[in-house]
Amino acid sequence: MQYDPIAERLASIRCELYESARQAGRATDQIRLIGVSKTKPPQAVAAALAADLHDFGENTLQDARTKIPHFAQMPAQWHFLGHLQSNKAKLIAQHFQWVHSIDNLNIAERLNHSALRHSIVINGLIQVNISRDPAKHGIAPEKLSFLLEKLLSADLQCVKLRGLMTIGNASANDNELRRSFAGLRKLAECTRLQFGLTLFDELSMGMSRDYRLAVLEGATMIRIGTAIFGTRNYPVTSTMNAPVLEDMR
């Protein structure tokens, strides 16, 4: 049997996740591990599925279309993590169960329109630029209430607002990262109380570098790419041909 490092990496991450959750007085079943499979071929996703990982994150439709069709009959959940362009929203709604990057009303309405047409429900997270990093997308923390008022008034029947997402600043130290993650948690708590949102309880924060800190500060979703799939291209050993989902232009 050919050795595959993905299962070993996943086992290591799960051990570290257990320890971080224990330190925070939390259970690991409160934290969803998302394998960020962007740029990786279907074979890498298949290896992670075989190691009992069921959530996968993609940043672009062009990349996602090379792998999602292979797993239509598998117990996989797909999370769109990248910046969302309005002209692609209708396609995203057809192929992803979660969208982590809602930051304006227009995007949410387009997602809702497509989801309604296909009789599906999208779980949506609002992306907040909690660290105010000019290189990152997402709304400023003080604009969250205003955006949420507009989203709730729009009666988005097929987009369920589930919480917040943020990306840690790559140049920040551990203390700064923890403050940012704690700030997102507190913002979510205040927002949930302000608007009476009983299911607004997801916090998507933490990646390969900083997921342990995010877990300590209440992350319910962590997005791990390199630590699972490695930095190099995963070797393609299968003869799978990745179909094109549809015209992505």
Image (cartoon, rainbow, N blue to C red):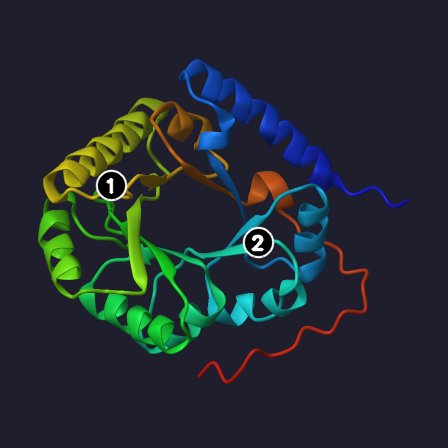
**Residue 101 lies in quadrant:** bottom left
Residue receiving disc 2 = 37
Is the N terminus in the top left, top right, bottom left or bottom right quadrant?
top right
Q: Which percent across, then down, holds residue 5?
A: 74, 40
Q: Residues within 10 Å of mark 1 (few under 14, many from 20)?
A: few
Q: Position of residue 194 (x, y in %)?
A: 10, 40
Image location of residue 129, percent across then percent down: 24, 46
Identify the secondary structure beneath mark 2: loop
Q: Nearer the viewer, mark 2 or mark 1?
A: 1
Q: Nearer the viewer, residue 122 or 5?
A: 122
Q: Type of residue at label 2?
A: Ser
Looking at numbered disc 1 in the image, what kind of residue is underneath it? Thr
Q: Which mark is residue 198?
A: 1
CA–CA distance between discs 2 and 1?
Answer: 31 Å
| Residue located at (46% from left, 34% from top) | 31
Q: Is residue 183 visible?
A: yes
Residue 37 vs residue 220, the one in the foreground: 220
